[in-house]
Amino acid sequence: MTGDNRSDLFFLPSWPPTPDVLLWVSLTIVVAGLLGEFVFRTLKLPRVIGYAAVGTAVSAFGPGIGGAALEPGLRLIVDLGLALLLFELGARINLRWLRANPWLLANSLAEAVLSFVAVYLTLVYLGTEARVAAAIASILVATSPAVVMRVASEFNASGQVTERMIVLTGLNTFYAVLASKFVVGWLHAEFAGSWFRSIAHPLYLLVGSAVVAALLAWCVSLIARRLDLRNENSALLLLGMILLALSLTKMANLSTLLVPLLAGLMLRNSTERPWIWPRHFGTAGGALVLLLFVITGSVWSVDALMTGAALGVAVILARLVAKTLATVVLGRPSGISMRQALALGFALMPISGAALVMMADLQTVYPEFAAQLTGIVFSAVAVLELLGPIAVQAALRYVNEDKIR
């Protein structure tokens, strides 16, 4: 065929066809959606297990992201998906409950502190450097907001254990972000020799995030006075506002975890009535959450598992024992039975997206130091991305709080 003939057929696609990002994203959504539905309908397990399994398969046949920094596109999806879930979670935390039941706040503090201490001591005992152990322990204080919110919503769970699980998850995520930022401050003092930076950086993150969160909460409250947030169009407007706040957060180098969590919490405690809107703010939010679980399911790699799997399993067990011990010891004073307290401890097991974001933030500031953590943290995330949702479902079923069987 002559050059002129080829130019006449310019409208035909190149051969072989070259797939673009849109193809892979759409295929991921279709496959993950189908597998999630199969897992839910056939095995009666949370759909997120199917989503995470797709991510696990992606890593099995590719490099995955274990041991590497999140690419900007993947980080954006993780931030957006988590922002929706954290905003929902914060909007369900009633601080008046903590004032009325101070033992519940004591339970929250105890499970977070014990989790940190248990993980730290376990890692140090097994030969991990103290500052590495402290960084890992601060990150693993947090229970996965994504898993907790998704499983509770999917099974229409309600009751004492469900509500306490949500409150404790929101609070320990807050503690974990603060602890991880103070670890970064410690690293500033050690690596950069700047005590000013070590104090100013965490303080800026906390105050700046609170300011952006307050602005978001005020804007949502203003809109709610004039529009019904249960309406699809209004929910899309709310989704857009959350995304706008997240973009401002990223521009100002603030915490993408604290802003939506604090905004939801401020909104909930500005009024006596609960806030109601479509789950994950509609279809677009649902797709983001699905992709969030696929990405977090792909954090493992062979290298990461080889370097950190044993320690990852050790910290999972230490963390589970610590959280369960705290809830069991303080369960009765806070007003629940031993059975409910045991279920609550197991429901706090999951870790996933929030830990991934805190790791990514640390990689941005001190990549060489963060490389020492990735094997352990990503191994723990990879294991609990699949086992965590099952633990939450089993815990809620154990106390008869799941409504779908």
Image: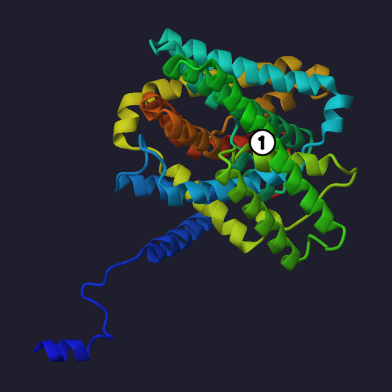
Is any part of residue 222 visible from this angle? yes
Query: Crowding near pointer 1: few (<14 within 10 Å), some, many (20+)?
Result: some
The residue that appears at 55% across and 36% down in the rendered structure is: 354
Q: Give residue 283's position: percent from left, percent from top.
A: 62, 63
Residue farthest along the top direction in this orientation? 125
Q: Of helix, strand and loop, which one carries label 1?
A: helix
* Quarter of the figure that contains the N terminus: bottom left
User: In the displayed structure, would residue 137 be above or below residue 278?
Assistant: above
Q: Between residues 178 and 49, which one lies in front from this camera angle?
A: 178
* Furthest-left residue in this view: 2
Question: Residue 94 placed where, x, y %?
Answer: 82, 36
Residue 206: x %, y % from top left: 66, 30
Instruction: State the residue position of label 1.
Output: 208
Q: Is residue 319 visible?
A: no
When the figure is inspected, residue 385 is found, relative to residue 118, above or below; the finding is below
Q: Is residue 275 left or right of residue 67?
A: right
Query: Which image quarter: residue 351?
Result: top right
Kind of residue indicated by mark 1:
Gly
Residue 216 rendering spot, x and y as whole percentages: 73, 48
- Name the residue: 68% across, 24% down: 342
Left or right, residue 166 beside residue 389: right
- Determine the residue positioned at 44% across, 60% down: 31
